Amino acid sequence: MNFISDSFSDVLIVGGGIIGLSLARKLHKKGVKKITILERGKLGQEASFAAAGMLAPQAETEKPDDFFHFCDESNKLYPNFAKELLDETGVDIELDKSGTLYLAFSERDVAEIRKRYEWQRDAGLQVEHLTAQEARKIEPFISPDVCEALFFPNDWQVENRKLLTALQKYAEINRIGIVESAEVKNLLIENGKTLSAETASQKFPAEKVILATGAWTSLIKSSENVPSLPNVRPIRGQMLSFHTAKRLLSKVIYSPRGYLVPRFDGRILAGATVEDVGFNKSVTQSGIDFLLENALEIAPSLVNLQLSEKWAGLRPFASDGLPILGTFPEIENLFTATAHYRNGILLAPLTAEILADKIAENFDSKYLEVFSPLRFAAARAICK
Ligand SMILES: Cc1cc2nc3c(=O)[nH]c(=O)nc-3n(C[C@H](O)[C@H](O)[C@H](O)COP(=O)(O)OP(=O)(O)OC[C@H]3O[C@@H](n4cnc5c(N)ncnc54)[C@H](O)[C@@H]3O)c2cc1C
């Protein structure tokens, strides 16, 4: 799908995953006129499509730090995000607020979930400590070997593929420019200002440019040296899904080794591997074996179910595992929103909000400082 209203954009977004698409919507809602998304392949077919759609601040974080608060605040935006998208596009993104169970199967797991329980209780979060019987009463299909469990009522899930459909539809309805099969190779920067993003055959001039390029961010070159350009690398995640005629589980279920995500259509997603193998999206037999082992540990009765799909995606990872958001001191009109690693679906609404506030209204969220690309430039200077 290629639609572009004019060759000059007020804001050019490089990358059409959940982050680029959410940003385009938010900027449009704030009144930015000419927005263009340049996408290397097709919109929304990379990490954002591969994801499990869990919105899990309490299962995914280890302490009540800035990252936890960023996750938690973004999660709280989801009910409104889902409602608005339904009104705007007619697409139901299937926000499911049934909560998440976190299971322990060994002494080591028990120690881990008790530690998690304590920091979350001390931080005033909603978390329940359950006996094995209580957990199995909530989810009868989980293994009889479970020792104990936590329940997070505020860790939810969304159908991320429908979310991508909704965001793409929003872009189309509102005539946001979309150019697919357009891989940006280089940023043309002169005297500290980005003039255009360049593919092999075309230049796209713009007033402001945002890199929302996920795992591929570090491959983009620039005509002037930008010391704080983000260093991001791909971390492969393999997933599979089982087909069931009716929903066997009511909640997302974690163990310290994997997770199951039941969808409304009866599929149960099982994830995910975490592999540092470069830009390689293959599904491997060892990956599938690992996923099956962890899925069957959680719910042994899945053994009888048919596998319906296997896939892999590349999570964008920065060296400290945190998102990279904001501006570059050397370049006045260049922005980035990348490195969301395991939580880009969860973090999309707040990422879009704070970047759009900065770009459209020059308002600085505290998170732009916490997750600034400059943190790496400072570290590099110390290392010299
Ligand atoms: C298996 C798996 C499970 C996951 N589960 C969850 C989960 O349950 N919950 C959660 O919150 N997160 C989850 N994640 C993480 C989440 O998917 C990512 O953090 C998120 O999708 C990142 O979004 P993005 O838009 O930055 O990246 P992407 O979706 O990868 O989009 C980046 C886009 O930029 C394009 N692009 C790159 N370079 C260029 C270029 N030079 N020119 C033009 N276009 C370019 C790419 O083609 C791509 O479409 C999971 C990830 C994986 C792989």
Image: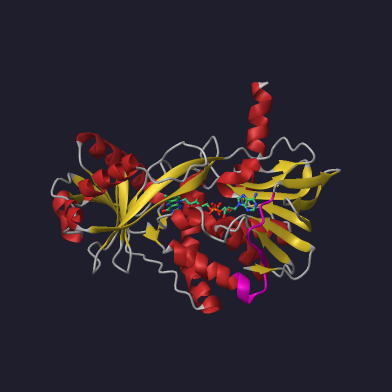
Extreme residue in the front direction: 201
Residue 276: x and y in percent read 46, 36
Left/right placement of residue 372 relative to residue 195 reads left
Q: Nearer the viewer, residue 66 or 313?
A: 313
Residue 247: x and y in percent read 25, 66
The part of the image, by quadrant, that contains residue 160 is bottom left
Quadrant where the image shows the N terminus: bottom right
Q: Image point 47% across, 64% down: which residue?
A: 78
Disc tally is 0
Quadrant where the image shows the C terminus: top right
Location of residue 95 with respect to 316 vertically, above or below: below
Location of residue 115 with respect to 128 vertically, above or below: above
Residue 373: x and y in percent read 65, 41
Extreme residue in the top direction: 384
Q: Image point 53% across, 73% down: which residue?
A: 84
Q: Image point 56% across, 45% down: which residue?
A: 215
| Residue range highlighted in magenta | 171-184
Left/right placement of residue 146 relative to residue 195 reads left
Q: Is residue 256 visible?
A: no
Q: Image point 66% across, 61% down: which residue?
A: 37
Left/right placement of residue 306 relative to residue 373 reads left
Location of residue 192 with respect to 307 vertically, above or below: above
Residue 343: x and y in percent read 47, 50
Q: Nearer the viewer, residue 123 or 301?
A: 301
Residue 207 within the segment the image draws in magenta: no
